[in-house]
Image: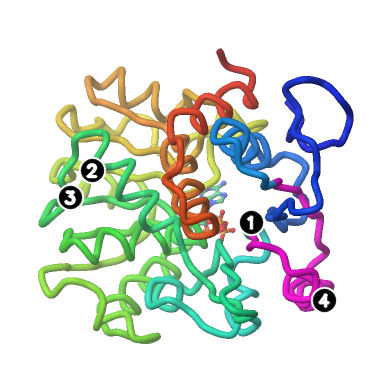
Amino acid sequence: MSGGCSSTTRPSTPIISGQTRIVGVIGWPVAHSVSPAMHNAAFRALGLDWCYVPFPVHPERLAQALAGVRGLGLGGINATVPHKQALLPLVDELTPEARAVGAVNTVMVKDETLVGHNTDVGGFLRALGEAGFDARGCAALVLGAGGAARAVVYALARVGAHLTILNRTASRACDLAREFASGSQGTATVVSAEARLEGGSLDEQTLRRAAPQARLIVNTTSLGMWPEVETSPWIEGVPFPADALLFDLVYNPRETLFMRQARTGGARAVDGLRMLVHQGAEAFELWTGVQPPVEVMYAACTAALGGS
Ligand code: ATR
């Protein structure tokens, strides 16, 4: 599906006018992103004279790209891999969330000031709420300790969850748990006093010990993501707790091997597409000030991923 943003005369395609506001996504690579389809569908549905463009930005060109956002008067920008962390020192201001997570996925331009936001946090919590899950005080198991884990760990710590972070490289999980518990980057002031965090190794023995207590299990690793669809972070033979919810951040494919493993164990599993949509919806509202058409955005993502 195209972003729907050319000036050809197909009836469903918006025309660029003299007043069109431009937003977009910077990434390297960026061609796989479904965000252009998602946001342009939302602009079309609301009749807004806005357009969302993919910008392939090499890491060495990030500062220049950001200067371009300001210089060209763009409405804002999303950032994806590998720019989320690198944007931190390049924006003028950070929200407490972006500072605590240590990543910016949305830049808003406010009176020529570039403000770095992190809408992954709200996107995750909203998607969790939609799945009917109340994470306050719950025992949660987070698999992975990379960039994607940071927003999830922060979000869960903020609502007072008791977190066990397990990672192939155990030291990264321990460092992440320590950071959010002790408040480097000011995180202790924004996470709940009820939150408990510990880190460990993603090995069979540790997983067997941690799994039975967990009410929520979140996969933040890239395992299971296309094209590595036959991989999973769940270790073969460890029973999946039947009354837990699996939240897999992967959304391509829509059903991962991990989700099948959880369902076979009798558990409920949700994919990462609602989180993707909600982080996009929050960015949309920041830029336009207009309530986002969430279901239109969801349908556009589903179609862009080849679903119906
Ligand atoms: P992202 O920003 O997408 O989170 P990342 O920072 O590279 O990317 O983190 C990827 C996560 O997936 C890490 O937790 C990584 O584990 P390591 O810290 O040990 O590298 C995890 N991961 C990636 N490939 C993995 C594999 N084959 N087995 C287990 N974990 C893996």
Image quarter hosting the N terminus: top right
Query: For the residue labelled by badge 4, is the local secondary structure a helix, a strand or a loop?
Result: helix
* Mark 1 vs mark 2: in front: 1
Front-lying residue, 149 or 72: 72
Question: Residue 249 at what x, y percent from top left?
Answer: 45, 42
Q: Which residue is mark 3?
A: 135
Find residue 80 and name its label: 1
Q: Which mark is residue 64?
A: 4
Amino acid on which the number 4 mark rests in the picture: Gln
Give the CA distance from mark 4 to mark 3. Answer: 40 Å
Q: Badge 2 is on which residue?
A: 216
Which corner quadrant of the image does residue 65 belong to?
bottom right
Classify 31 as above or below 73: above
* Residue at the spot 25% in from the left edge and 33% down from the top edge: 131
As for residue 157 lying within the magenta part, the answer is no
Mark closer to the chain start, 3 or 1: 1
Cα–Cα span, label 1 and label 2: 26 Å
Q: Are marks 2 and 3 in contact (CB under 8 Å)?
A: yes
Of pointers 4 and 3, the one earlier in the residue sequence: 4
Question: What is the distance, in whole Å, between disc 4 and disc 2 at their CAs?
Answer: 41 Å
Instruction: Name the front one of labels 1 and 4.
Output: 4
Q: Badge 2: few (under 14), some or many (20 or more) residues near its Cα, within 10 Å?
A: many
